[in-house]
Image: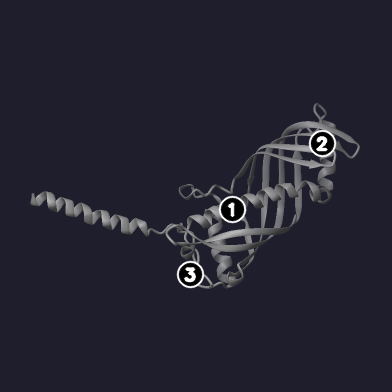
Amino acid sequence: MNIQVANKSSFLIFFVIFICHYGNAKLAPDYIHPCSDTSRECLIKATQDAIPGVVKGIPELGVPSMDPMTFDKLTISLNNLTFNFYNGKMTGFKKCVVDNIVSLLDKRKFLMAFHCNLTLKSTYDAKGQFLLFAIDGGGDAMVKLTNLKMNLDINTKYIKDKNNIDYFSIKNYKYTFDYGDHVFFDFKNLFKGNKQLSDAVLQVLNQNWRTVVQDFGKPFLDFAVGYSVNTMKKFFHSIPYNELIYVPIPL
C-alpha cells in the first residue's frame, strides 16, 4: 500500500512539473531575437535574422511557407488580353534585404522597407490581342524581378487569447513598390506552332518591360503581399507578444 501511495505521489509530482514546464514553454523559434527597444538598428537586425526561418514556414505552429509561395491559379486581364497562370511557385523571399523599419507601438503603426530578387515559375495559357497580334498560346512561364523595392505601411493592434495572453496582430495595410532594375519575361509558345513569331513578340515584351509591368505586374504583387501579410498574421497569433519584443505594450 505504501508503495502504491508513493508511486501515485511520484506520478502527481511529475505531472505537475510537466504541466508547469510545457504550459509555459517558449514558442518562438531560436532565430527570433527580441529587441529590448524599438530602435531602427535592432529591429532591422532582428527582422533580417528572422526572415530565412519564418519564410520557410513553421508547420508546428500552423504558419505556411512563403518561400516557395505557391498558388493553383492566378488570372490577369490586360485590356483585350487574358493570362491564366497555373501551379505557380514564387521564390526569393528568404533572401530579401531589410532596408528600414520604424515601429510606433503607441500609434499602432509599423513601417517596413525592403528589396528582393523574385522568380515566378508556372504554366500558363493566354488569349486575346496584344498590339497588332492575336495571341493564343500556352506553355511554361517564368518572370524574374531584379531588385524589386517594397514599402509596407501596417496598422497594428493587440489582442488577448482566452488565457489573457497578449499577441501582436495586423489590422490593415497598404503598400507601394518600385519594380527595380529589371523584369524579365519568358513565355513559351505564345503563338501555338509559330516559334518565330512567339520569340519576336517575347522580345518586344522584354524590351518594353517597364510599360508591360505597369498593368501586368501588380496582380502578382497584390497576391504576394496579401499572402505574406496573412502568413505573418498567423505567425503573430501563434507566438505571444512578450516573446517577440521586450517592450511593454503601450497603454
Residue named by callout 2: 199
Residue named by callout 3: 246
State the image quarter where residue 134 is shown.
top right
State the image quarter where residue 171 is shown.
bottom right
Q: Provide residue 60's location: percent of width, then percent of height.
A: 45, 48
Instruction: Give the amino acid type for the residue marked by disc 2 in the picture.
Output: Asp
What numbered label is drawn on residue 182? none
How many marks do you count on the picture? 3
Instruction: Give the amino acid type for the residue marked by disc 3 in the picture.
Output: Tyr
Residue drawn at the location 49% of the way across and 71% of the way down: 248
Residue named by callout 1: 94
**Circle nearer the N terminus (2, 3):** 2
Residue sitting farthest toward the left: 1
Residue sitting farthest toward the top: 193
Residue 28 vs 192, above or below: the answer is below
**Circle nearer the N terminus (2, 1):** 1
Which residue is nearer to you in this view: 116 or 23? 23
**Circle nearer the N terminus (3, 1):** 1
Residue 235 vs 138, above or below: the answer is below
Residue 49 vs 189, above or below: the answer is below
